[in-house]
Amino acid sequence: MDGKWFDTWRARWARLKRAWELGIAGLLLVAGIVLFLVSIPELPSMIWGTLTGDGEAASTLIVSVGAVAVCVLQWRWRTAFYPQLKRDAAAARAEEHPKEPSA
C-alpha cells in the first residue's frame, strides 16, 4: 500500500516540476520576444550609432542581441537545461527506439 501512495506522489511531483520548468522556459521565451519587439523601433538608431562610433549604442545593440539569443536558445534547448524535461525526453526516446535484446 505504501509503495502505491509513494508512486502516486512521485508522479504528481514530477508533473509539478515539469510544469514549473516549462513555465520558466516559456516565460523566458516571452521575455525574449518582448525584448525583440521593443528593440525593433530603436534598431536603426542603434545600428547607426554603432557605425558612427557611439560606444553606448554598440553595447546596447550587443546586449540586446545576446539577450534575445539566450532566451530563444534556452527555449530551443530546454530539454538540455531543465532536469525533469531532460528525463522526459530520454524516456520518450527510449519508448520510440527500444533497445534490441542482446544475442
Image: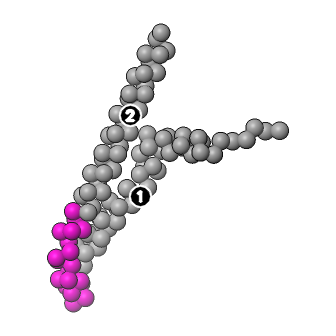
* Residue 42 placement (x, y as % from top left): 17, 77
Give the residue type at disc 2: Arg
Task: Using the image, tell me which numbered label, if any, was put on residue 15.
Answer: 2
In this picture, residue 76 sits left or right of residue 43:
right
Could one spot residue 20 in this view of the protein?
yes
Give the residue type at disc 1: Arg
Q: Which residue is drawn at 32% across and 59% down?
A: 71
Task: Using the image, tell me which numbered label, if any, was put on residue 32.
Answer: none
Q: Residue at x 30, y 51 (%)?
A: 26
Could one spot residue 55 in this view of the protein?
no
* Residue 40 placement (x, y as % from top left): 20, 74
Foreground pick, 46 / 72: 72
Element carrying mark 2: helix
| Main secondary structure along the magenta-highlighted residues | helix
C-alpha span from label 2 to label 1: 21 Å
* Residue 82 placement (x, y as % from top left): 41, 45
Relative vertical location of residue 99 with respect to residue 76 in this rendering, above or below: above
- Check residue 37 for magenta coloring: yes
In the picture of the structure, the residue carrying the numbered disc 1 is: 76
